[in-house]
Image (tube, rainbow, N blue to C red):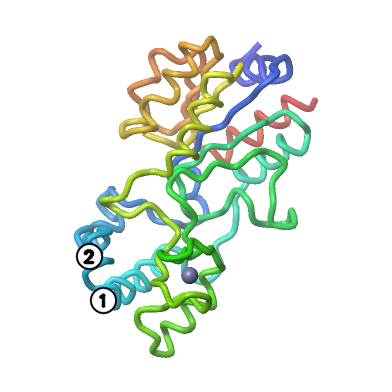
């Protein structure tokens, strides 16, 4: 029996299955990463995207943010086969939670009525929403981007006049405590923990698989390259997530 078939067995037998996803999940959708040679931080200055700069000069921040958003997402970014496979596992009742570092919103979009049958924890927020700094209202970012393009800089909340901020965790901001708490709880409770498309080098990505391992989970790394956690993981599957995840899903339901 190969690794995929054995991992599929563990998933079928598990009460709680948790997937943790990183940038490698979305590169097949055409979303550039941040840190590689062709990554976004070679085209944009990370200094421009600090929370402190947003507060000090929100108009200039938003102008740069709009350019970054267009470079990241272009016109027609779609979920790929790996997103679809996780959504199908959730529909099958075989996946309980997705914890993601990605802000692209692709886990909950596509031909599924824009939702997913697992709990979705977006640790770094969602770039397709904005949040009001004063009243906390969250709203779709697309109309706000159009307002910026027609000259409303910085964009403000229609309810209270507060500044709109992208609903993502900027440099210099902390992760949302409640979301992080729930992610850690899922890692502790998991019977199977899948770490997908993440180098697992920065926090909290580095510690969540270790938390799951200490809690007794069967852990699997599904990634193109080796990660610091790979030697510890029960399954170390090297490959393209858009190949591995559809195979895994097919093996779970067969
Ligand atoms: Zn407001």
- The CA distance from mark 1 to mark 2 is 9 Å
Mark 1 — residue? Answer: 60
Q: Earlier in the sequence, mark 1 or mark 2?
A: 2
Q: Nearer the viewer, residue 193 or 178?
A: 178
Q: Are marks 1 and 2 in contact (CB under 8 Å)?
A: yes
Judge the density around disc 2: few (<14), some (14-19), many (≥20) Cα neighbours within 10 Å.
some
User: Dividing the picture into quarters, in which one does residue 168 lie?
Assistant: bottom left
Residue at (35% x, 67% y) in the render? 68
Which image quadrant: the C terminus? Answer: top right
Which image quadrant: the N terminus? Answer: top right
Classify residue 149 as left or right of residue 190: left
- Circle 2 sits in a helix, a strand or a loop, which is it? helix
Classify residue 238 as left or right of residue 111: left
The x and y percentages for residue 205 are 39, 32
The x and y percentages for residue 14 are 69, 17
Classify residue 197 as left or right of residue 57: right
Judge the density around disc 1: few (<14), some (14-19), many (≥20) Cα neighbours within 10 Å.
some
Whether residue 136 is situated above or below residue 230 in the rendered picture? below
- Circle 1 sits in a helix, a strand or a loop, which is it? helix
Whether residue 101 is situated above or below residue 232 in the rendered picture? below
Residue at (41% x, 72% y) in the render? 162
Mark 2 — residue? Answer: 53
Q: Nearer the viewer, residue 221 or 201?
A: 201
Whether residue 91 is situated above or below residue 52 in the rendered picture? above
Residue at (40% x, 64% y) in the render? 133
Residue at (55% x, 54% y) in the render? 105
């Amino acid at each position: 029996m190969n690794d995929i078939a054995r991992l599929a067995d563990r998933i079928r037998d598990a009460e709680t299955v948790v997937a943790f996803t990183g940038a490698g999940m979305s590169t097949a959708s055409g979303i550039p990463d941040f840190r590689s040679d062709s990554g976004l931080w070679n085209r944009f200055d990370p200094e421009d995207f600090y929370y402190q700069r947003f507060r000090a000069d929100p108009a200039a921040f938003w102008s740069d943010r709009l350019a970054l958003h267009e470079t990241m997402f272009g016109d027609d970014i779609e979920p790929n086969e790996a997103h679809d496979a996780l959504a199908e596992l959730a529909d099958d009742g075989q996946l309980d939670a997705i914890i993601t570092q990605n802000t692209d919103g692709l886990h909950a979009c596509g031909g599924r009525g824009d939702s997913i049958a697992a709990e979705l924890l977006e640790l770094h927020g969602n770039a397709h929403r904005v949040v009001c700094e004063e009243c906390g209202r969250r709203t779709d970012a697309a109309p706000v981007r159009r307002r910026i393009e027609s000259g409303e800089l910085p964009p403000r909340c229609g309810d209270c006049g507060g500044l709109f901020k992208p609903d993502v965790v900027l440099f210099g901001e902390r992760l949302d405590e409640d979301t992080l708490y729930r992610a850690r709880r899922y890692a502790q409770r998991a019977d199977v923990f899948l770490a997908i498309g993440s180098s697992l080098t920065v926090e909290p990505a580095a510690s969540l698989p270790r938390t799951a391992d200490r809690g007794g989970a069967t852990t699997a790394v599904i990634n193109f390259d080796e990660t610091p956690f790979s030697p510890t993981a029960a399954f170390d599957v090297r490959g393209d997530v858009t190949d591995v995840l559809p195979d895994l899903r097919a093996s779970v339901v067969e």
